[in-house]
Amino acid sequence: MPKNSKVTQREHSSEHVTESVADLLAHEEPVDYKRSVLNVTGETWDKQKDGDEELDAENRPAWNSKLQYILAQIGYYVGLGNVWRFPYLCQKNGGGAYLVPYLVLLVIIGLPLFFLELAVGQRIRRGSIGVWNYICPRLGGIGYASCLVCFFVGLYYNVIIGWSIFYFFKSFQYPLPWSECPIVRNGSVAVVETECERSSATTYFWYREALDISNSISESGGLNWKMTLCLLVAWSLVGLAMIKGIQSSGKVMYFSSLFPYVVLVCFLVRGLLLRGAVDGIMHMFTPKLDKMLDPQVWREAATQVFFALGLGFGGVIAFSSYNKQDNNCHFDATLVSFINFFTSVLATLVVFAVLGFKANIMNEKCVVENAEKILGYLNTNVLSHDLIPPHVNFSHLTAKDYNEMYRVIMTVKEGHFKELGLDACLLEDELDKSVQGTGLAFIAFTEAMTHFPASPFWSVMFFLMLINLGLGSMIGTMSGITTPIIDTFKVRKEVFTVGCCIFAFVVGLIFVQRSGNYFVTMFDDYSATLPLTVVVILENIAVAWIYGTKKFMQELTEMLGFRPYQFYYYTWKYVSPICMAVLMTASIIQLGVSPPGYSAWIREEAAEKFLFYPTWAMAILISLIILASLPLPLVFILRQFHLVSDGSNALSVTYKKGRMMKDISNLEDNDETRFILSKVPSETPSPMPTHRSYLGPGSNSPMEMSSAPNGRYGSGYLLASTPESEL
């Protein structure tokens, strides 16, 4: 052997030799293994295939700019929930006092878990399936569960976009079609539609004209063709935005992410100029401090934080996987989290400014109607004129004068007051009427806009904003499906996207039948909450306890160029798992305490009525939860008992173009084999972690391979697939 060879040098060295054969091989010049006689795998070298693999690996899409990526993240997280869920929770749970538990939970749960998902996606540069297969193959079901939940959420979420599209096109007329009740002719007599007269014009338009809703979930009533067409348009928009991956969806985000802010600011300025807007905002921000001690408030705040950031859906991981390795994902996590919070506050200001205006309108209407009743009682001598204060003028009756008159009559006629049927007409009562979700967007807000000057313009802007908010969230949700599937199974992006949209449209027809709104409620309440909570808990455990928090922190230091705050170490390892476990327990208890049901619109009564789900609907509900959670135990069992090969103790080594590529999957704990697969850390094929190569005798940083729990499942990922990274 030549005297200057590395092995000879080590033989003459007095230092203790601890390197393995693999360490020594790592310092020799690599050869083209597939073409050599040392091809122990028996693979034949295919030049065309070899080139195709390298081309595919080196062409992973990337964001055109940091701005495009941030806008995509904002478009995903800032969705319909910010506009109609957060304001409702704020009103229900103590106004300004609700912001305290929300901010606390955002910092100790939302931000750390959001940062964790961004970091693993950027580090491993794969979708949710590939990421969790790499970190812990036995928990590889996390990725599949995320895909299923994304599919369930996408099914009904796009229906809401379809509803917004319907209202958008109906807004191009004056007066707005929901501003007045329709007139029905009965022979020569024209009468107001009974259902509308007993409810309101906006409520009637929503339930009868838009949904044509049935009385219960058991009454299908057939397809609503108007909504079916709108759903087709919605899925077409999503398909067109997604068909080229981030090349097409990234460009869409420039408009869909920024336009809602323009509309919100316009609505805020217009809302503040409305009479009664300040009453609504003051009502919203008046803190009810006793609410902060209510555990239910903290549970709802945690749930809102959880869903507002899209944790567990896979969209976070998918978007960050297209980033460069040196991107500061910690800055991204902090920025997007607080943009999300301030957007929720902005939307809440807009909502309560408009609802304050609406409350004043409805209160004035109440005063007029009850004043007419009092005049009738005065004319029929049921009430004495002496009960009316002398300064009260019925021609210009104010809310203050009516309240004074109301209290006098209630005091004098105490025994027979209920028979008079008078209402208190208090502004606070109108402001306390909690509305959320579709009730806020399609009933309360639309009713308020009918009183705006140039109401069609504001209606068009509002529903165009909802369409954009929904579209941005749908792109993120669909990325949580398409990115991991395309990464894992190497299907054609365009074919899979189109097929996925067509399949989702066909399955989604269940939501556009006359009872479809009840199915939307079922999916919204039960298809995601519990499965996603379990998914995020397992994600946290996989990184913090199985992969190792210290190891993960070290790799983040190498990737970011600085060490993340120690705060993240403790939240990932202790705080977040405990908080998420408490949230999951509370959700299960809530599910058991409150029997599943829904609010049905009864046509004959022109009112909502709470109904329990029938047996067959309960079976669907339970099946949704089980199906979304099923990949978690299924994949674990299959890989734990080796019913499906996860590559344990399998080593396939190939050399290509001067670099040694690896496929090491799931080495068992007793396997002490150590490999150095490259001369420079930037060429290490493993996406995570970054290993240091052997630096010579006496080096105190030899490379060590992790054992089974930190292995990688399947055929492995070649380094060439991440050209921009420094993996």
Image (spheres, rainbow, N blue to C red):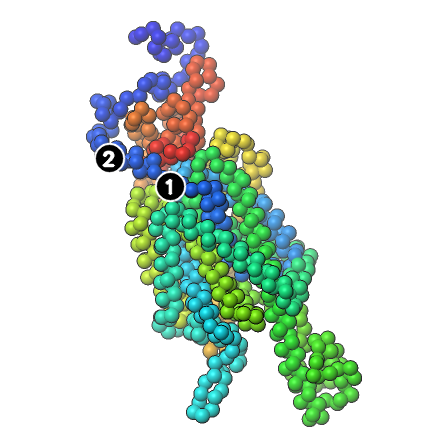
Relative height, residue 421 to residue 315 (above, below): below
Mark 2 and mark 1 lie on one chain; the one further toward the N terminus is 2
- Residue at 30% x, 29% y: name it: 652
Q: Is residue 517 visible?
A: no
- Kindly identify the amino acid type of the residue bearing the numbered disc 2: Lys
- Residue at 50% x, 33% y: name it: 560
- Tell me the element at label 2: helix
Which part of the image, by quadrant, shows the N terminus?
top left
Relative height, residue 180 to residue 93 (above, below): below
Measured from the top left, where is residue 8 in percent x and y? 35, 8
- Tell me the element at label 1: loop
Q: Residues within 10 Å of mark 2 (few under 14, many from 20)?
A: few
Relative height, residue 672 to residue 567 (above, below): above
- Residue at 54% x, 70% y: name it: 454
Per the rendering, the mark at residue 49 is 2
- Residue at 44% x, 74% y: name it: 209
Per the rendering, the mark at residue 500 is none
- The front one of 484 and 584 is 484
Q: CA distance from mark 2 to mark 1?
A: 21 Å
Q: Is residue 339 visible?
A: yes
Per the rendering, the mark at residue 61 is 1
